[in-house]
Amino acid sequence: MSDEILLRTDRGHVAELTLNRPAALNALSDAMLAALKRELDTIAADRSVRVVVLRGAGKVFCAGHDLKEMQAGRASDDKGAAYFKDLFSRCAALMQAITHLPQPVIAEAHGIATAAGCQLVATCDMAVAAEGTRFGVNGVNIGLFCSTPMVALTRNVPRKQAFEMLTTGRFIPAERAEAIGLVNKVVPVEDLRAQTDDLADAVAAKLSSAVKIGKEAFYLQAEMGLEEAYAHAADVMTENMLWRDTDEGIAAFLEKRPPAWNE
């Protein structure tokens, strides 16, 4: 395995990013946050990439922030406030970059996804988990309420389920994570890569411009009232309908043939 903390492999139209700090359980160090943000910014401008897969090297997906680095940051600042505000601001920028990325992002989780690692899964557009994976926002166990992971978690799962996870600090198994909507599906460990690839390939096969405009509209309408959401969605759908490739897709469907898209 390379010494680089973040690995990228392109497979067709799918960009695969691997958190590569297995000895540190792929913790989100300052360097890892920066590397992820930098790579996502590059991918956002790459029209050849239609889907992103995010996975972790070694035994786990991601164990959250690097606590040793956080303690060192506290020691370097009089009260730690400046360091921590900057850290959580950078983490928030990364999570929002995933949401604002034109391409869908799929988390491939295994082992554990805890605290900011669970936040990462919740932030991704979709997630596939291996059987035996455990998810948690466990900061309360060490006296630190997982307030920033809470933002993504409460936008994925019912409130009572999220509050239980946040206040008990207990892990939930993959099957419960699927039941409450944190992940899309749970698969045998040996099938994890293949099942994630299948999901990524299914999305990558679609008209990417339609998926991109749809992803943006998906998150925007979710924050709107019902009437405003319908009005916005109608505008987006009207724009989409006027595309040449969409006209070709409809014609191909009616003529029972594959579409000949320009992209």
Image (cartoon, grey):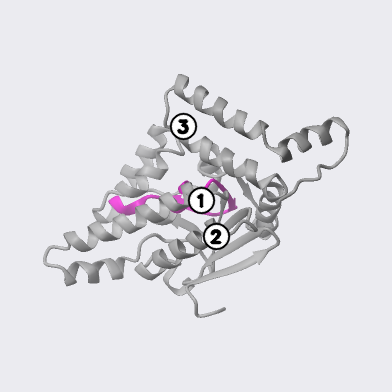
Quickly name the residue at label 1.
Answer: 101
Residue to which mark 3 is pinned: 222
Q: Residues within 10 Å of mark 2 (few under 14, many from 20)?
A: some
- Disc 2: which residue: 43
Depth check: 27 or 190 in front?
27
| Spot occupied by residue 136 in the image (x, y as percentages of width and height) | 41, 50
Say if mark 1 contacts mark 2, CB within 8 Å. Answer: yes
Query: Which residue is located at x 75 percent, y 34 percent?
Result: 247
Find residue 223 and report its image quarter.
Answer: top left
Q: Residue at x 37, y 54 (%)?
A: 93
Q: Residue at x 81, y 33 (%)?
A: 251
Question: Is the residue marked by circle 1 packed among few (<14), some (14-19), or many (20+) residues within 10 Å?
Answer: many
The amino acid on which the numbered mark 2 sits, given as a three-letter code, is Ile
- Residue 204 appears in the rendering: yes
Asked whether 121 falls inside the magenta stretch, the response is yes
> Would residue 180 be visible to someone looking at this image?
no
Q: x and y percent of residue 149 in the render?
A: 36, 48
Q: Nearer the viewer, residue 240 or 86?
A: 240
Camera-nearest residue between 235 and 64: 235
Region rendered in magenta: 119-140
